[in-house]
Amino acid sequence: MYGELGYKLVVHAKRTQALNQLPPYQTDIVRAVTREVRDLHGDIDEITKSYDGDFNPSEDPARACALLVHHLCIRRNKRCLLAYHRVRAEKIEQMCWNGMDVAEQAQAARVTEGDDNVAGTSSHALSPEEDEYARQYGDMLAAYKGQWTDIDLTGSLEPPKDLFIDVRVLKDAGEIQTEYGAITLSKNSQFFVRQGDVERLIKQGFLQKLS
Amino acid sequence: MPRPAKSPPPTTFYLLPLNFPTLQPHEAPIPPAMEDIDDILREFDSQNAPSNAKDYDDLLKWWINERAAPEILQYQEDLVERIMTRVRRQIEQIEDQTGNLDPRSNFQLIIVQTELERVKFLIRSYLRTRISKIDKHALHILSTPTIRHLLSISEQTYLRTHQALLNELYLSSFLKNFPGNLKRLDDSAGGLTMVEEPDLEGAVFLRVVRDVNVAIAWENGEALDMRAGDVYVIRYSAVREAVGRGDVELI
């Protein structure tokens, strides 16, 4: 049925919004919807051609209705496709802002989704186009951020309350340099450190902030 | 015993929470004789260059404005520049001072650093708010030159590059297979525009800074006298210009 695949895409998009990771790109559905659009457009062309340009809707309401439905379907499919890609693009942007490695995230998603998919290797979390987009967006963000090195634009958007905070180390993070000397962050240890020094590590999930 | 008539000069900490850059670590207490000169100097200062405290208040004000207004506002280039210069100076100073083990100056340093973090947060949040608005209303901003000029140069670059990238993504993902008349991204066919615009009719809370007269779009085009200090809830479009001029501040 017309539009059914488009609806599927929207459902996927909705689901993506609630997820932390980006689920695999639905190459097949996207391709099918695009094909549907092309077919519908071909039908429209055929109908209008058979009339040689002097088509009068009131004389042939059935044809007029068919044209209208075709048109609406195409528009709807386009909206679905745009929505789907937009949601994913926003997700990618968010990852870039959070300083996550998009490719790595995609890898992780592929592994988890692969469980219920025997041919797991064939599904890619990111389409090649999205890969490219992620890379270029990252570059652009770095360029914009580069003008504000003192501020660290990707830093926390929570107003800072304390200069120093308690953190617990969740994963070994090696040694970091602070103004007060080097600290070795080994798992399960706890530190009282300057927030600015460790913010990045908290975001990346190495440390947990204790309140 | 009568208490000494003259109270000790206020310490530098007194002004701290609002005046971050005024505190110089290690500042020697001002000798009484110098105080008068200082007062005179300060007066002179406030007439000329915008003072540190005012800049901080302004930043706070524009940050709140930016967060409360539905549309993007004029980028406060001079203000941000001035504050950034001071932030950089402050960072240098802190770097100079670390390693100093004197407990008194160490304590001062912590206060300075906290203050610095707060200012950095303000600027960060200010810029990020603008970026999120730019992303949201990208096509609207791009197609309206008057709005485009409210952006800083780097924000304009960001906007253009981002849109080009998005376009490229859509195009290579599926749009390239679409019939020509459906490739546009700024269509308004079918009574539905694809360009998202800010909702200027939304209500905002504001405080009046200077007396203004605002024309309200009632049937009879009535005007409303707003007195300094008053607080209103009003449609944003009615006070748009007043916000830009700084006559009112959003809260």
Image (cartoon, helix red, strand yellow):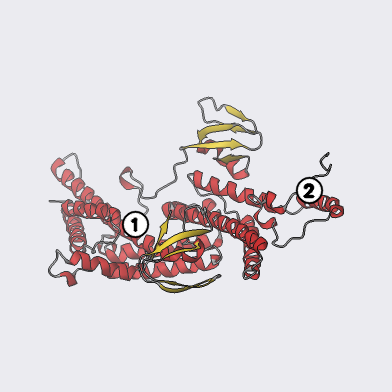
Which chain letter matches label 1?
B
Instruction: Give the image quarter of residue B94.
Output: bottom right
Secondary structure beneath dot 2 equals loop
Q: Which mark is residue A39?
A: none
| Horizontal side of residue A92 vs A198, given as left or right | left
Answer with mark 1 or mark 2, whichever residue precedes in sequence: 2
Q: Amino acid at mark 2?
A: Pro
Front residue of this view, candidates B25 and A102: B25
Front residue of this view, candidates A124 and B117: B117
Q: Residue at x 60, y 51 (%)?
A: B59
Q: Position of residue B2 (x, y in %)?
A: 83, 39
Q: Which residue is mark 2?
A: B8
| Horizontal side of residue B84 vs B172, given as left or right | right
Instruction: Give the image quarter of residue A208.
Output: bottom left
Which chain letter matches label 2?
B
Q: Which residue is mark 1?
A: B184
